[in-house]
Image (cartoon, helix red, strand yellow):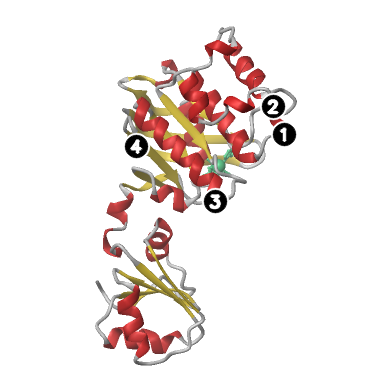
Amino acid sequence: MLRLRDISHTYRTRKSGETHALGGVSFDARPGEVTAVIGPNGSGKSTMFGLVTGGLALQQGSVTLDGQPVGGARTGVVFQSPALDQYLSVFENLAYHAMLFGLRLKRSDLPAELIDGLDLADRLDTRVDELSGGFQRRVELAKALMTEPELLVLDEPFTGLDPAVRDGFFAMLEQATTSRGLVTLLVTHDLGMATRCARVVLLDSGRVAADARPSELLAGFGSTVVVIRGRELHGIEAQVREAKGPRTLRVADDALLLCDTSLRDVLKILDEHDPRIEDIEARRPSLDDYFVSVSGFHPQGGIQELEAA
Ligand code: ADP
Ligand code: MG
């Protein structure tokens, strides 16, 4: 178990003076689970990343893995910006990385299950700059996992990946985490991906604003939400209310979010009134929905909750 306790961090620079980046952050991340760390820009995610990976010196509080200071643990790191030598082949990048750990890596030393699992076997001699962005990320993951870490920490690893590649990369990450019993900390602003993690820790202004399973945060949303877009939504709001239908949140001037419902029920309500709709979408709730419901889009202060659940 990775345990952060009462972590505070202050940057001191000549230019901007003191910045309190983290103020009393505590949370746990369990082995075999991907824990997402999310939060708006400037909320302290990268600072937390630096403290866990040893890039930044701890000023206050403690970071331990199974009770020991995290500095002594084997940690795999995937940085936000690519950390591969573009002119070397995949194998050369892995071998060079192993060398930093004092290992002379022969091809036969490569863990087959890792290389096959990431589908890199046929690409070991390919120069990194000839690989797609998705494959470059896989090489980074291979690098991070090669040294058999107990802790894996990734900072925004999905940047620049298209959705299909991103989903595949996440699946590999999840698979590696469960099968190896890794403690995996995933810093991301991709709320769709965070929804798929075992746990999410939300940082806001250097503090933990939420620490829960996504299903706990989404408990009130049911298994399906329906989003309606259109110009004249007041009428629809009234209809839904009249029908004693789903809980309704106004999430933008031109969008309504109907929670805990089914497309069929919503269509039934709409059918009777024939309103002007531009677009309607039914999907599983994601953390995006949770955030609009707590932080609120509405310019006049918060989401307008029209019907309590
Ligand atoms: P995030 O990764 O969530 O965007 P950061 O941890 O990068 O947040 O930043 C948290 C706060 O600390 C911000 O106010 C940021 O401006 C400040 N900060 C981050 N790095 C430095 C630094 N090296 N020097 C001074 N201030 C910093
Ligand atoms: Mg950051």
Q: Are marks 1 and 4 in contact (CB under 8 Å)?
A: no
Q: Are marks 2 and 1 in contact (CB under 8 Å)?
A: yes
Whether the residue under disc 2 has CB within 8 Å of ligand 2 = no
Task: Report the residue at 30% width, 64% height from top.
Answer: 221
Please name whichever residue, 144 or 60, is drawn nearer the observer in this view of the structure.
Answer: 144
Which sits earlier in the primary sequence, circle 1 or circle 4?
A: 4
Q: Are marks 1 and 3 in contact (CB under 8 Å)?
A: no
Residues packed near mark 3 inside 10 Å, few (<14), some (14 to 19) or many (20 plus): few
The quarter of the rendering in which ligand 2 is drawn is top right
Can you give x and y, in whole percent of width and height, for residue 124 in the image? 63, 23
Q: Which residue is mark 4?
A: 26
* Quadrant including the C terminus: bottom left
Measured Cα–Cα span from mark 1 to mark 4: 42 Å
Task: Report the residue at 58% width, 29% height from top.
Answer: 139
The amino acid sitting under disc 3 is Pro
Whether the residue under disc 4 has CB within 8 Å of ligand 1 = no
Of labels 1 and 4, the one closer to you: 1
The amino acid sitting under disc 1 is Glu
Can you give x and y, in whole percent of width and height, for residue 138 in the image? 56, 33
The image's mark for residue 130 is: 1
Residues packed near mark 1 inside 10 Å, few (<14), some (14 to 19) or many (20 plus): few
Measured Cα–Cα span from mark 1 to mark 3: 21 Å
* 107 up-or-down from 162: above or below: above
Which sits earlier in the primary sequence, circle 3 or circle 4?
A: 4
Of labels 2 and 4, the one closer to you: 2
Q: Which residue is mark 2?
A: 126
Which sits earlier in the primary sequence, circle 2 or circle 3?
A: 2
The amino acid sitting under disc 2 is Thr
